[in-house]
Image (cartoon, grey):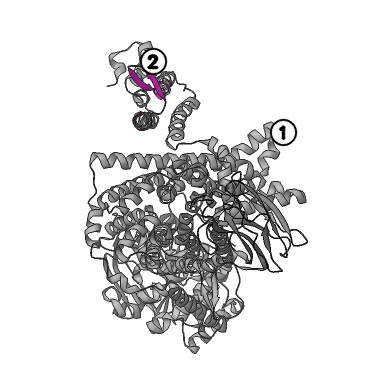
Amino acid sequence: MTASAHFPTPSFKRKLPALLSLVFPGAGQVYLRKRWRGIAILVMMVVLVFLIQWAFDNFKVGLWDFGPFTTSWLWVALSGFWAWNVFDAYRLAQGRSASRWLAFLLPLIIIYVIAWQVTDVKLDRLVTRFSDAQIVFRAIANPDLLERDKAAQIGQTTFWVPCSSPPQPLPTLAEPYQLRTDVACGDVGEAITLRGQGLIPGMTGNIYWYLEPDGTREGQVREGGQAVEITIKADGTFETTFAIPKIAGLDGVDPANPLLQAIQVRFIQEVGPLHLSATFGDIIGRTVEGVFIPGQIFATLALGLLATIFSTLLAVPLSFFAAHNVMERVPGGTAIYYVMRTILNVVRAVDTIVWGLLVIVWVGLGNLAGLIALTIHSTAALAKLFSEEVEHIDHGPIEALTATGANLLQVIRYGIVPQIYSPFLAYTLLRWDINMRSATVVGFVAGGGIGFFVVETIRKGGYREYAAALWAIAVVIILVDWISGKWRQRIAEGDTKMVLLRPKPWYKSLRKLIYTFLLLAIFVGCLSILQIDLRKLFDPSPSFGKLLGDFVTFDLSREVLDTVLKQMLITVFQALIATTFGALVAIPFSFLAARNLMSRTWLSRGIYYVVRSIFNVLRSIEALLYVAIFVFWVGIGAFAGALALTITTFALIGKLFSEAIENIDAGPLEAITATGATRLQAIVYGILPQIVPPFVSYAIYQWDINIRISTIIGFAGGGGIGLLLSTFFGQLQYHKAGTAVLLIVLVIVAMDFASAQIRQKLV
Amino acid sequence: MLQVINLTKTYPNGTQALKQVSFEVQDGEFLAVIGLSGSGKSTLLRCINRLIEPTSGQVRWDGVDVTAASGRDLRNIRRQIGMVFQQFNLVKRSPVITNVLSGRLGYTSPWRSLFNSFSKEDRARALDNLEQLGLQDKAYVRADSLSGGQQQRVGIARALMQEPKLVLADEPVASLDPVLAHTILKYLEQMNRERGITVLCSLHFLDLVHRYATRAIALKDGEVVFEGLPHEIDDAQFKAIYGQEAERVSIV
């Protein structure tokens, strides 16, 4: 049967697995009945070979130039892995095994080298171009939310260019004059002294040269490249000397025909109390003739709220079709169950932003498109969560109610609804939080909400407006996060709370009536803020059918596949780099944000609150909104996207890590200390085993999330497949866009599955 | 009178839970059904009100063929037959009063019940039943905040709301402490004596059967292996029902 039957020599029998693995990686391990080890080695090998070749073809990663031929040094690392596989088979045959460290280390080196180059990581730019980024940071520190009125003081006098002979007389000035020159005329480059008096002290201003006293052609007077700045002294005077600027000679310098020109001094100062700026009005709202007109942030709130309401209404019925315990009772139900589950997973894998691109073809740019995109994605996500809850329904009460003679409707009302109401509400609240975050960015492509406003400000370079939007978003999201969290906590606690008073039916309780009324008012308010025209739903643009048809006829030509695959891999590597950076930075901070470690002194408690707040604020803003900062800092491309993702990763992982630290069980530490171990030994054996698995598990989970976000980060200039997608959509190449979306779905569903499997093994 | 005639149940996986089971229950009896786990007790009780569909055979209740009824007729039969469960089967998140009132659903118009609207008489009756079971102050707390024994009493109150002529009790005390077991069975006994409700109760422990039942049947592998008075179960009978290795145990 086995090879050993033909080759009975024991030494050969020991070497056979190694030989097998030498010829075919993993074969020796499979032969030794370590089937999964063998398959893992083979899969790893195939993936690495493909990646090295791909990275070399596209990016010359690991280039070694030997004149006539070039290759990648990563092949050497791969040979190392191959050698390890042979050695492992050899050791396994002897009943031992090779070190696993190398098995993980070599592929990791290869993957990170490729990821580093593909993502175009240029850490030096963070330092060398920091001065560029300072503009943004200064704007963030000083967002355009408040401003003062501006007061202007303008003084003007005339001047001849050049002098005639005899020189022109100084203009006669009526007292009180404000401005005079020491001479009445001069040539370009000659120094003149300008004096002023009777001015408001303390103001600073600049000098402007006019080619005609009442003309519009002007130039600022500069000295050594800097605008000449003058400050009015306490007595209301100033004196400055400067050279006549070149602009004065623009119309020719002819002593026979001197020209009357003008010098103007403009002092502009902010005066009066701070008041809300125009940007504040755009973002939050303004009052016009006593009527409050809500700004973009309210439109965003309305988007998130309506999307949550609509998606909940849609997800409730859908969830029953995706619940195994319900569908197995219905004829043909199992088939419907699988179809439903697949649809939900695919719809969920496509980001809201990408749905936005599809929806705008249907209903055009605007709030409605954003709302539909949010609703589609949220419905799929909620229906999946709901269906899992339906699958956990306790069958006992249903049986008991059936036994009392209740009909189907009554069984649902009294046996099923009370069981699912609370968990459904909790999931809906969680989803509201997520939808609010998505609503802040859906405007990037679909129009509507604050996302659209942000795109506009970035395009105009209005960084203080951009900063104002970021702050407003942070406040709103933190608020929504807090409300949703508190509410969910109350639902969870309500599980054991005793109700001692007989509750009234809803139509008799004033409080519930008010709530119902409030809910309706909010719903109507949201609709009116968004000014949604539902008729558009039934009136798609004429090309919609054709474009949709194009979209599902995937273009699988070699050229398109190569391009799409390249950008998809960049996206995956970008997410890997961002996760790694974010997690590494988060580790030290997570210890500072762990309550159990930081509650000793008031100083450490202070640090705890500061770090926690940093996490919360950074977490409240979507990665897509951060991209603009890094595009400005390190330039457009995958690296900027990776850095934006790093920020959100840092905040989220930092929070999760710190919670893992808070959950440390002190028992093992105590037990190991009791054995006489040193402090270091106690930490290594008592603490690390408790935090490393959750850390790794969270990091993998975050990578999974980051790949999802990476697919859209290109819409803001962050590189990867998002950029490609927006190009395809922009150029109406829907068949290519379809290919890209298809690949995104495949990768995300696969990653989702893989990360769930790995995490299950870890914890 | 309840007549069970040649009742057979074969599950889709081939398990024969009941084999040609026949017996009669006179009005006012307290009939105990005993047997090992898996002997078919639960299946038998559920076939009587058709929570489980029997494969063949007949169940007749006051002369009406239960096995042939469907739709509204079946629901009308069910509402006359109360049921008490081993796991209580309460809606844990609903208040006790709603759980009790749900026993009234068979009598309430569906549309009315959708809005949790029950008649004044029903509400009064629910509170009255709870009071008799010693739970009057728990009417408006959530069902899952009660202890196991209290939950089972709510289960009994729910069955009482149906004004049943027959109560099927499926291992009503198997999930409870021995002391509580007696409390619950005393309520069932009280129901049986004072209201004349026929009780069909599956039980594990023989001494409970001796103490409460007026008659007993025993099932083994889906077949009736004994039918008679509780004290007639001697050691030989006992071994036949529970197997050769079984020992008699008693609970408090």
- Alpha-carbon distance for marks 2 and 1? 45 Å
The relative height of residue A414 versus residue A21 in the rendered view (above or below) is below
Report if the CB atoms under discs 2 and 1 are less than 8 Å apart: no
In this view, the residue in front, A208 or B51, is A208
Q: Position of residue A61 (x, y in %)?
A: 40, 29
Answer yes or no: is residue B217 visible: yes
Q: Position of residue B234 (x, y in %)?
A: 46, 60
Q: Position of residue B245 (x, y in %)?
A: 46, 49
The image shows a total of numbered marks equal to 2
Question: Image quadrant for the C terminus of chain B?
Answer: bottom right
Q: Look at label 2 and name its amino acid.
A: Arg
Quarter of the figure with residue A341: bottom left
Regarding mark 1 in the picture, which secondary structure is present there?
Answer: helix
Same chain assignment for discs 2 and 1: yes
* Image-based side of B164 in relation to A220, left or right: left
The chain letter for the residue carrying disc 1 is A
Mark number, residue A679: 1
What span is colored magenta in the figure? A56-76
Q: Look at label 1 and name its amino acid.
A: Arg
Q: Residues within 10 Å of mark 2 (few under 14, many from 20)?
A: some
| A70 inside magenta stretch | yes
Regarding mark 2 in the picture, which secondary structure is present there?
Answer: helix
User: Which residue is tagged 2?
Assistant: A14
The chain letter for the residue carrying disc 2 is A
The relative height of residue B222 versus residue A747 in the rendered view (above or below) is below
Q: Position of residue A630 (x, y in %)?
A: 51, 46
